[in-house]
Amino acid sequence: MGAAEDLADLSAYDGAKAALAAGEDELVPADYAKRLIAGESPLRVWRELRGLSQVKLGRCRGPIGCRLPTSRPGAARGRWRRCESWRRRWGLG
């Protein structure tokens, strides 16, 4: 590995640590990451990671919150990511 690659790695590491410290990013346990990689519903995985039941999640989003995705998992991702107010309430960004 060359010096330029070492520097790039150190820079990426420093950036990741800074984002964690600022609360802009978080660590995800390997069990949950594997479920996401395997294609499990992101909504289900994040809900369980946060310890929320479906009922608690419904209350969390509030009466004017975004519509939670109910269609097939792949199609729901875009709508889920775009719902910024819901994500902030749930602690996802």
Image (tube, rainbow, N blue to C red):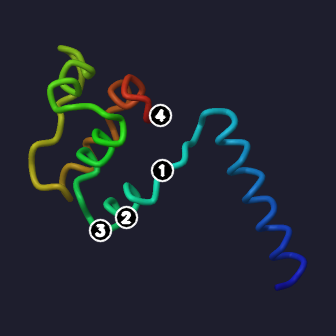
Q: Residue at x 17, y 31 (%)?
A: 67
- Chain-order first, disc 2 or disc 1: 1
- For label 2, the residue is 34
- For label 3, the residue is 38
Tag 3's secondary structure? loop
Tag 1's secondary structure? loop
Quick one: which residue is furthest to the bottom in this view?
Answer: 1
Closest to the observer, 76 or 24:
24
Q: Residue at x 68, y 51 (%)?
A: 16
Q: Residue at x 18, y 35 (%)?
A: 68
Q: Nearer the viewer, mark 2 or mark 4?
A: 2
Tag 4's secondary structure? loop
- For label 1, the residue is 28
Q: CA distance from mark 4 to mark 3?
A: 23 Å
- Chain-order first, disc 4 or disc 1: 1
- For label 4, the residue is 93
Q: CA distance from mark 4 to mark 1?
A: 14 Å
At label 4, counting other C-alpha atoms closer than 10 Å, the crowd grade (few under 14, some 14-19, many 20 or more) is some
Q: Nearer the viewer, mark 4 or mark 3?
A: 3
Quarter of image, res 70 = top left
Specify whether 16 is left or right of 27.
right
Give, as a three-letter code, the residue at label 2.
Answer: Lys
